[in-house]
Image: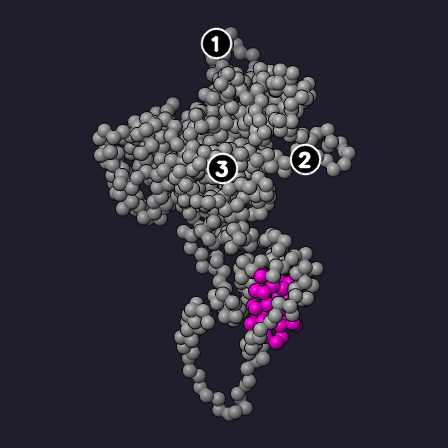
Amino acid sequence: MPAQSLHTFASLNSFKIPATKAPSSRSSIRSPSPSLIPALPIELQPSQLRPVAFRILSKKHSLNIQTSGLEYLADYIGRKYGRDWRSKCESLLNDIGKRWKEQDKGQFITAEILPHIIQEVELRNASFTGGSGLNSGLNSPVGELVVDPLMNFNPQEFFHVWDAFEQPRWSYNRLRKHFEKGTPPSMFPSSKHLVNTMGARYYQLYHRLLRNEKFQAPSFHSSRAIEWHAITIIKNLLGRHGQAFCVLGLLVKGSNGEYWAEDPSGRLELELNNADFGDGFFVPGCILLFDGVYTRTERFRVNSVKHPPAETREVSREAYGYLDFMGVGSIGSTPDGRFDKVIEVKMIAEEQRKGKKAKIAVLGGDMHLDNLETFDALARVLAILEESSPLAIVLSGSFLSLPFYNNGVSALYKDNFDQLAHLLAKFPNLAKSTTFIFIPGNNDPWGSTASAGGAMLWPQRSIPEIFTSQVRRVLKKSVWASNPCRICYYSQEIIICRDDLASRLRRNNVCATKQPVQTGSVRDAIDMDIDEPTQQDTFAMSQTTEAGVSDVTSQSAEILESEQIIHTILNQGHISPWTKNLRPTITEYEHALTLSPLPTSLIISDSSASAYTYDYKGCHAMNASSFISRSKRHEISWIEYNTVDRSSRVNTTAF
C-alpha cells in the first residue's frame, strides 16, 4: 500500500469514538445496512469493461477512450464496486462523460486526466447526497480525500503577482494553431530564436484573422460573398500586376528610406502617399493589413491601412481550449494545463462576494522620491486610501528624477526609500493589510546605468533588494515586480506596465499628418446656437466662446489619442509593437509581452499621456498619467480599479 494511503488510514484510525451505553437487550442490536458495508475489491479486466465503456462513453457521449484510460477505469471500478461493478458503474461512466464534455478535454480520454475528473465526480455526488466524501476518498486510487479547492479558500492563493522572468512560458505552434508548453528561457539563445519569435507573432495574428467572419470565405453564394477579404501572401503577388490584394505584413523601414511590408514569404515596397489610415497609430514593428494594387514597378500602391481587428478574451480562450497560461497558483488548472470552468464560476462568485472591499489603487508614474513634494503628495493619497484599505496599491517609477549612475547615487537612492519606509509606517492599516506593488521606471537601477534614462531592454527587472530593505520591514506584504508584470486575481488577469507609450507612438507614427476626427461633443460645441450678443458684450462673448471651444477641442483630442493608443496595443496583441531599434526587448521573454488572450484589465502607467479609462473588446484599460500633474501644480491623480464590476475611476486632489 502506498505511503500516502497508509497515512490516510492512520489519520482515520486515530479518531476516537465516544463511548455509548451498552444496549439492554439483544433485540436492540441492529445489523449494519448493506449499503454501508464496503464492497470487496476484485481484479476487473479491461476487456470486461470495454463493452460498457463503449456503450456509454463512445456511443452516448461521442468520446474515445485510450487503452491506458480503460485500464485505469477498470482498476478503479473493480476496487470501488467489487462484484456489483456491472450494475453500479454505468452512472459513474455517464458522469465522467458529462464532466469531460463540460470541461472540453478533447476527444480522447487519457489516464493522465482521469484521476482529476473522477475526484470532481465523487465530490459532486457527495455534495448532492449529503455525504462527507471520505468513502470515495478511501476508495480513490490516488489515496487522497476529495476536497473542494474553494471550500476553505485563502485569498492570498488567488492574488498573485507574476514577475515577467517567472511567468510560465507558452510557445505558439503555427502548424497546430495552438499554444504549447515552452522550454525554459536560455541566457544564450540562438539567432534563429528571434526569427521564430517574429514568425510566431505573425502567425498568431494571421490565424486570429482567419477566425474573424470578415476573413472567412462563404460556403455558398450569398450576399456576404462580396464582403469577405482574402489575405494573400507576398510571394503570390509576383506576375499579377494591376490586381487588387489584401496583404498582412510587418511594417519596417528599408535601407532606401522607404517603408516595406514583410511576411514569412518575402518583402514588398509600399507606396503610402495616398493611403487612407484607419484607427490607431502606425509605427514600424506593427503587423498591419494593407489593401491596395500591385503595380508593374513591383511596388504595392496602398489604398488603406488598418490594424488587424482584435477578438474578445472569451473567443480567444475558446479557440485555445481554455488553456491556463498563468497557472493561477495550481488552483484552477487541471493536469493537462486547461482551466476548470466549474472552478472559474466559483471564482467569479467569490469576486462578487468581496464587494467594494477588493479595490486596486494605481498611483501615477514618475514618483520621484528625491523630490520633497512627492512625499507630501503621497501622504495625502495614503491618508485617503487608509479609510478604504484597498486590496493593493501600485506605485510606479521612475523613483529617481535623474538616471542612476555609479557615482555615489546608490547611497542617495537607498536614503530615499528609507524615507519612504518612515512615511509608510505612519499608516499601519495599509502596511498590515494592503499589498504594495512597486514597478521600476527608466531611471531605476540597474538598467539606467547603461541606457542613461532612455528606453531599456524589456522586460525590466525589479529594483534590487539592497535598496529596499527598510520598506520590506515596514510593509507586511510588498511585491517588487518587473516591468511589465501580471496580477492574477481569481478569474481576472491584470497587466501592469510602466512606459511612455504615447510619446513613442507620436514620434514614430507613419501618418503623422493625419488630423484627429472631431467627435460629437466638439461639433456640438462649435455648432451650438448662441443668441446674438449686444454690442457691449461682443468682445467678452467672443473670448468666452473661443476659450470654451478650445478647451473642448483639447479634451476631445486627448480622449481620441487615448482611444488610438489602446486600439494599437490591443489590436497588435503585444505591449511593445516596435522594431528592435525603437524598443529593444529580450527575445527569450517575449511571452511576457504578448496580449493573447486579451487581459481582463490593462494598467498603463504613461506619464506622457493624460489620465483616462477606456473599454475595448472586453478589456478595461486605464492610465493614471503622472503622479504629480505637470500642467497643474500641486495636483495629484490616481485610479481606483473595482474588481467586482471591473471598472475604474480617475481621482484627483490637491496637496
Residues tagged 3 and 2 counted as in contact (Cβ below 8 A): no
Question: Tag on residue 172?
Answer: none
Marks 3 and 1 sit apart, C-alpha to C-alpha, by 55 Å
Picture residue at 54% right of the left edge, 91% below the top: 27
Question: How crowded is the residue under tag 3: few (<14 C-alpha within 10 Å), some, or many (20+)?
Answer: some
Residue 636 visible in the displayed image: no
Q: In the structure shown, which secondary structural element does the residue marked by tag 2 occupy?
A: loop
Picture residue at 46% right of the left edge, 53% below the top: 330
Marks 3, 1: nearer the viewer: 3
Q: Point out residue 132 in the picture as x, y percentages from the top left corner.
A: 51, 68
Question: Tag on residue 216?
Answer: 2
- Residue type (three-letter) at the residue carrying disc 2: Gln
Would you name the residue on which mark 1 appears? Answer: 539
Q: Identify the main secondary structure in magenta.
A: helix
- Residue type (three-letter) at the residue carrying disc 3: Thr
Residue 65 visible in the displayed image: yes
**Nearer-N-terminus badge (3/1):** 1
**Nearer-N-terminus badge (3/2):** 2
**Nearer-N-terminus badge (1/2):** 2
Question: How crowded is the residue under tag 2: few (<14 C-alpha within 10 Å), some, or many (20+)?
Answer: some
Q: Is residue 342 above or below residue 8?
A: above
Q: Was residue 72 drawn as part of the magenta stretch in this picture?
A: yes
Q: Is residue 155 left or right of residue 427?
A: right
Q: Which residues are magenta?
A: 68-95
Would you name the residue on which mark 3 appears? Answer: 594
Q: Along the line of sight, which residue is nearer the eye, 140 or 258?
A: 258
Question: How crowded is the residue under tag 1: few (<14 C-alpha within 10 Å), some, or many (20+)?
Answer: few
